[in-house]
Image (spheres, grey):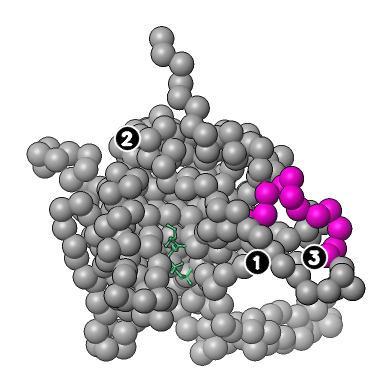
Amino acid sequence: MAEPRISSIDGKLAKEFAVPSHVEEEKEKMAAFATHHVAAGRRVVLITSGGTKVPLESRTVRFLDNFSSGRRGASSAEYFIDAGYAVIFLHRHRSLYPYAHTFSTINMLDALQFRSGEAASGHSGEVVVDQKVLPNVVKMLKRYQEVKESQLILPVEFNTLSEYLHLLKAAAQALSTIGSKAMFYLAAAVSDFYIPASEMPEHKIQSSNGPLQLSLNMVPKILSPLVKDWAPQAFVISFKLETDPAILLEKARRALDTYRHQVVVANILDSRRGYVVVVTPSSQAELILTEEDVQNGVDIEERIVSNLTSAHNNFISPDGS
Ligand code: 9Z3
């Protein structure tokens, strides 16, 4: 039997990115989750969500970060679950979470009131929620609890770029057993630059040494072994973010050519909540929210997920069977 191919990225991952201690445990959980849901007739989507932290010191005081809130991933998870998928939610620690994300700008203490109880009854009081401050809280809470009880979502957390890379590899390997029933929805905003473990100072960089010059290495393109080696039968969607609309579609097409995966969802930083282009090797679909959609509370993620779940159907059974 042929030896499995070890890509050079595997070597780099092991050498230059600290391996999180719980990666094997998480891999087993993800594999068990996938097998269980596929046996129950579901498909499984691995969603990555949020930004990555790139440390400048190994006892980290300072780090590079990015803008991503995790809203795209959190909101999409809800629509995938509504569409019958089980979700592995690989997200940045404390980034937005499914069902809770609509309340992220509210100070919880403004939504709660304390009513003291009767001393004689031994009841010290109760906390009451003001539903004007938290609209839809009952609906969201019920749905969150249903989803949690049915174990339709498996949360896995990362914080640093290293954790993200190792956990994504583990996820890809864990999902390889379910073949084309696995979808990868790579919405996390992952750093392109990092300082390798071997070049990272241990202690806090001293400002007394004067101005700081950083030299950053390129992060290995993990999409390449994911598509070729780790989960070759899966349906893979990457996201392409730009700030200049003039280069967006060309960059999306180039990514499809280079990595040979199925879909790139292209978006521009400022308009990402209302406009994306779903690009495949043979098609290009603009998804746009109108003023009316926004007023009616429609999310662009509903459109994205609907487009991709149909494309996944065709991928699994091209003849419509
Ligand atoms: C995206 O483009 C996501 O849509 C956003 C969502 C991160 C813009 P939020 O989390 O934003 O809802 O605030 N994700 C991928 C961005 C990315 O870094 N892609 C890389 C690239 O474009 C690698 S595939 O080169």
Q: Which mark is residue 86?
A: none
| Residue receiving disc 3 | 61
Say whether residue 27 is left or right of residue 127. Answer: left
Please identify, in this view, whether the residue under mark 2 or under mark 3 is nearer the observer.
3
Q: Position of residue 63 (x, y in %)?
A: 70, 65
Q: What stretch is highlighted in magenta?
A: 194-205
| Residue receiving disc 2 | 233
Query: Which quadrant is the C terminus positioned in?
Result: top left
Q: Is residue 201 magenta?
A: yes
Q: Is residue 120 magenta?
A: no
Q: What element carries label 2?
A: loop
Q: How crowded is mark 2: few (under 14 residues within 10 Å), some or many (20 or more)?
A: some
**Is residue 180 depicted above or below 3 in this figure?**
below
Res. 192 visible in picture:
yes
Tell whether label 1 touches label 3 (CB within 8 Å).
Answer: no
Q: Position of residue 276 (x, y in %)?
A: 30, 70
Residue type highlighted by circle 3: Val
Q: Where is residue 5 in the image (x, y as percent from the top left)?
A: 45, 24
Magenta stretch prevailing secondary structure: loop
Tell whether label 2 touches label 1 (CB within 8 Å).
Answer: no
Res. 146 visible in picture:
no
Q: What element carries label 1?
A: strand
User: Which residue is depicted at the point 72% across and 86% down?
Assistant: 114
The residue positioned farthest toward the left in the image shown: 319
Please tell me in which quadrant of the rendered image residue 294 appears: bottom left
Q: Where is residue 50 in the image (x, y as percent from the top left)?
A: 53, 63
- Between discs 2 and 3, the one toward the N terminus: 3
Q: How far apart are marks 2 and 3 (CA)?
A: 41 Å
Q: How far apart are marks 3 and 1 (CA)?
A: 11 Å
| Residue receiving disc 1 | 64
Q: Regarding ligand 1, which quadrant of the image does it lie in?
A: bottom left
